[in-house]
């Protein structure tokens, strides 16, 4: 299947889902006017992708500086889908990447981490230079 | 009118308001407003977390106007345009070193009761209650009439430093004006 590439705009994130390398990345800011519409192709792609997965190791990197409340709901649904897939035996790791100064993002990430038991959900802290400083 | 404009600007200044917009609010406009506010606060050396908080409040509140304001330019039936432009007021300011965001828009009188109950409920919650409530609501399916996730107000209440202040003013038999103020 094709990779999914949605270029970032002023109110939506950069989305790069690489099917061959099993690397799914969402980076930037997310506050589109209609989050459900914007993310609908993402869910469609993810569904097909999960179906064809066998024993590959999948990495999902989420690096969002800001996301509005509708996007927060979308993220929950997105993680739900990945968690269900992990439940059926797929090997999926989610990395929540946040800036060391960003308490809000840390909090959001931790709340998501609490919610999901099957999928591996890591918190990755990075400093201003983008270097990883901590992970848990 | 033109000679009163300075008096109007001074009045805004007295209230601590450094940004005020009244009119049709579109997503494009709010993107630029958000970016400009971020720039200004960074120049004033506001902390990164304050900048993001104010920014997110403006986005949530402005998007509430875009989704829910009852004052709108009618759809162009002839051209079958999907879009409508919604009207509202947004004001951002600073008082006693705290940033605040005020918003106002028209709503139908039938909506007042429900919105008022929701706001009163949020006013009574502390940070932990709000976090819990937010998580619970996010798990549910959005209501029929909700255009986003129905979480905007809870998000705003969560980020505010004190309970949301709000007011409803009845305008006529059909509409009221809803205004709110949140302080970071």
Image: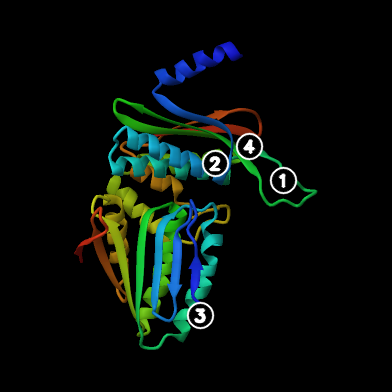
Q: Is residue A47 above or below residue A11?
A: below
Chain that bears disc 2:
B
Q: Which label lies toward us, 2 or 4?
A: 2
How far apart marks 3 and 2 lie (CA) works out to: 36 Å
Tag 2 near tag 4, CB within 8 Å: no
**Tag 3 residue:** A48
Query: Dot 4, crowdedness within 10 Å: few (<14), some or many (≥20)?
Result: many
Quarter of the rendering occupied by the N terminus of chain B: top right
Q: Residues within 10 Å of mark 1 (few under 14, many from 20)?
A: few
Q: Are marks 3 and 2 in contact (CB under 8 Å)?
A: no
* SS under mark 4: loop
- The part of the image, by quadrant, that contains residue A94 is bottom left
Residue at 64% x, 28% y: name it.
Answer: B172
- Return the residue at label 1: B75
Residue depicted at 66% across the width and 31% down the height: B173
Residue that numbered label 4 is attached to: B71
Q: Chain letter of disc 3?
A: A
Q: Going by the image, does A127 lie left or right of B2? A: left
């Amino acid at each position: 299947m094709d990779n999914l590439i949605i270029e970032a705009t002023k109110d939506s994130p950069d989305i790069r889902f690489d099917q061959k390398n099993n690397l799914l990345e969402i980076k930037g800011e997310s506050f589109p006017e209609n989050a459900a519409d914007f993310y609908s192709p993402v869910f469609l792609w993810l569904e097909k992708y999960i179906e064809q997965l066998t024993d590959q190791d999948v990495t999902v990197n989420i690096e969002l500086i800001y996301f509005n409340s509708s996007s927060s709901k979308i993220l929950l649904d997105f993680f739900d889908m990945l968690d269900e897939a992990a439940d059926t035996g797929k090997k999926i790791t989610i990395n929540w990447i946040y800036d060391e100064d960003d308490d809000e993002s840390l909090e959001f990430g931790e709340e998501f981490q609490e919610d999901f038991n099957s999928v591996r959900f890591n918190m990755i802290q990075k400093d201003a230079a983008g270097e990883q400083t901590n992970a848990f | 009118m033109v000679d009163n404009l300075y008096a109007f600007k001074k009045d805004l200044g007295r209230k601590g308001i450094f940004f005020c917009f009244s009119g049709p609010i579109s997503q494009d406009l709010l993107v630029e407003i958000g970016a400009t506010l971020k720039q200004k606060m960074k120049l004033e050396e506001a902390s990164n977390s304050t900048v993001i908080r104010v920014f997110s409040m403006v986005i949530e509140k402005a998007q509430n106007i875009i989704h829910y304001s009852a004052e709108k330019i009618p759809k162009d039936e002839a051209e079958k345009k999907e879009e409508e432009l919604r009207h509202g007021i947004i004001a951002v300011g600073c008082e006693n070193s705290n940033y605040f965001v005020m918003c106002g828009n028209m709503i139908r009188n039938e909506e007042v009761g429900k919105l008022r109950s929701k706001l009163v409920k949020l006013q009574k919650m502390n940070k932990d209650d709000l976090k819990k409530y937010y998580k619970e609501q996010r798990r549910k399916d959005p209501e029929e009439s909700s255009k986003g996730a129905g979480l905007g107000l809870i998000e705003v209440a969560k980020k505010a430093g004190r309970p949301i202040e709000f007011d409803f003013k009845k305008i006529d038999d059909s509409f009221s004006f809803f205004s709110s103020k949140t302080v970071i």
